[in-house]
Image (cartoon, helix red, strand yellow):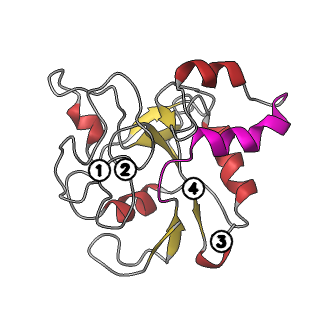
Amino acid sequence: MVLINTGGAVHPDEPAYCISKTEVTREVDNAFWTPRMQEQYSESKCQDAVAGPRKPAVFRSWNGARRFCQEVYKSGDLPTARQWEKACGSGEYCTASGTLNHTEAVYDVDGPADVGSKVANSNGLYDMTGNVNEWLRDTTADSYYSRYVTGGSWGYGDNDGDLVFLRAAFRNRATPYYEGQDYGFRCVALPEDSSK
């Protein structure tokens, strides 16, 4: 995990927290869910979607992602929109340069890359733009599409008008039960609880 301190240009009043350096990997997610498979987990869906232990964990609902973070870290949870934005830095995109390019983000391709395969952003975090959409803790006023995802995914392309989904400020909505092939997550925790 990476420590994000209070201060800085984005949400300077946000208390210090730690955030996962990469999206949670399939290997780590599988190790957590395998003993719990009868409760909300399908090994076959995940196996078919991505091959390799360093791929991001996908087909995980908001409920499942949140449970993972809360059980793995003592004070763990999904990041709030403010925490995610602060971890992004101050650019239009959550990349080291603040711009969108293929050396810093996985997008306009046929599937996710291994986590951490591109250049880290200014806070030392990987894949904040592209690779997979990431669940946020925040809820919406809509009773059905009541959760947010952000960051965009590998499938958003240069030429089809959906690069807006990759912008740091963009939030998409989904149901908390949705399990998508391009939906993943990372965790946050208080600094003293992030060493697990």
Residue nearer the viewer, 147 or 61: 61
Nearer to us of marks 2 and 1 is 2
Q: Residues within 10 Å of mark 2 (few under 14, many from 20)?
A: many
Name the N-terminal-most of marks 4 and 1.
1
Say whether marks 2 and 1 touch (CB < 8 Å).
yes
Looking at the image, which residue is at 60% across and 38% down? 26
Secondary structure of the residue carrying numbered label 3: loop
Q: The disc labelled 1 sits on which kind of residue?
A: Ala
- Residue 32 position by quadrant: top right
Q: Amino acid at mark 4?
A: Cys
Bin the neighbour count of mark 1 within 10 Å (Cα to Cα): few under 14, some 14-19, many 20 and up: many
Q: Residues within 10 Å of mark 4 (few under 14, many from 20)?
A: many
Q: Which residue is identified by label 1?
A: 168
**Residue 47 placement (x, y as % from top left):** 62, 23
The residue sitting at the front extreme is: 52
Residue 91: quadrant of the picture: bottom left
Question: Residue flagged by tag 3: what amino acid is it?
Answer: Ser
* Quarter of the figure that contains the C terminus: bottom right
Regarding mark 1 in the picture, which secondary structure is present there?
loop
Residue at image x 76%, y 38%? 33
- Does the magenta segment cover residue 15? no
Which residue matches tag 2?
128
Q: Look at 25% across and 45% down and name the residue there.
A: 167
Magenta-drawn segment = 21-38
Task: Give residue 29's quadrant in the image.
Answer: top right
- Check residue 187 in the rendering and tell me which mark sits there, or answer none: 4
Q: Nearer the viewer, residue 124 or 74?
A: 124
Q: CA distance from mark 4 to mark 1?
A: 18 Å
User: What is the distance, in whole Å, between disc 2 and disc 3 at their CAs?
Assistant: 21 Å
Q: Which mark is on residue 26?
A: none
